[in-house]
Amino acid sequence: MLSIFRGSLARRAFLTAGLCAVAGLSCLAAPAMAQPATQQITYLLPAPANLPAFAPLMLAEKKGYYAAEGLSVRWLTVQGGADVGKQLASGNGDLGGGLGDTPIVLRPNGITIKGVALLGGRTLHQLVVRDDANIKSPADLKGKTITVLAYQDTGFYATLGLLASAGLTRNDARIQGAGPAGVWQQVATGKAEAMVGTPEWAQNIEDAGVKITMTSTDKYFPGMAQAILASDKTIAERPEMIRKFVRATIKSVAEIMRDPAGAAKEYCASVPGYKGKEAEIEKILTYYARNVYPGQQRLGAFDPARVTKLQDFYAQEKVIREKSNPADLFTNQFVQ
């Protein structure tokens, strides 16, 4: 029986070889289709990667959205959004994060960057005040200590805008660049009365047992949400890379908007240090989903009218010395 089986195999192999020879085909195993090489990119963050503000980025990474686009992302933290812009313009990164305001502030200084996607229709920064400081409006900030992430961060410029909305200048308050920990700790310990920062820092102050009031700064002037930034050079030379990164990130933002509770669970499971803090993170991401991300006709797109209005405000209040062509501040070509 074994000899019959071996003979059958031999005849089958002979016939197969003959058919391949007649057809002019190779009978060697066909190699698997070559996969496109993974593209390594560096993304500059304005603050530590574990801040929930960067949840869309971190979740897109953990869920393989960047990998599916053929991207391998290296995350590098620098000193605020303005520093992100400067580093990108110098060629020290491929993409980075700041506010939609960032190009408005930097381009008059010859720093050629643009926003390539805007992660929300409202503003990222919140005015957070201690309830015992009796601050009811920006006018009450006169003589008070206000913390921001850094003087190189666009939160500092947002603070100038906030003061300007009440006819105040930088000299009318004490603005302190306190770093990612001090920015909220100084408010929590009473060393500062107010903070201009992100919702998660406000949550940290509340967790320390301090009663606060949080108000979106766009109540007082037309600030913007987080933006993905790129240099003019990168936009011209690597548009497909930018399109892939933007597509993956916007997908993640949309998922958080649909289900912030589910996103919080996934986030806590994937980011070290947040295990067991699902309720806290759900509260933060729900705030983003309800108060920061909404308000765009197309998710990720800049509103030209809002950009122009904000630049006019900054120019009027002398936060910037001259205005740029709005077309140089952002592009919606990568938002699908």
Image (tube, rainbow, N blue to C red):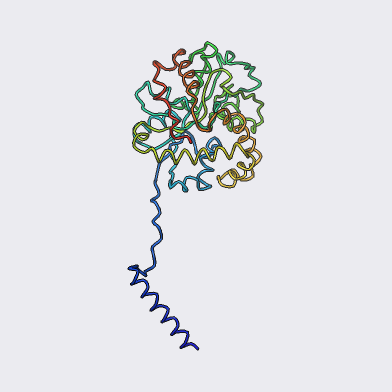
Compared to residue 174, the image places residue 256 above or below, namely below
Q: Is residue 203 left or right of residue 103?
A: right
Location of residue 260 by image quarter: top right
Q: Looking at the image, which is closer to me, 263 or 4?
A: 4
In percent of width and height, residue 256 lies at 59, 38
Compared to residue 45, the image places residue 162 above or below, namely above
In percent of width and height, residue 326 lies at 42, 22
Compared to residue 161, the image places residue 118 above or below, namely below
Q: Is residue 300 left or right of residue 85?
A: right
Q: Is residue 135 left or right of residue 317?
A: right
Residue that appears at 46% across and 33% down: 228
Residue that appears at 46% across and 15% down: 312
In percent of width and height, residue 51 lies at 54, 37
Residue that appears at 38% across and 62% down: 31
In percent of width and height, residue 141 lies at 57, 16
Location of residue 16 by image quarter: bottom left
Residue that appears at 44% across and 44% down: 73
Q: Looking at the image, which is closer to me, 190 or 124?
A: 124
Compared to residue 173, the image places residue 335 above or below, namely below
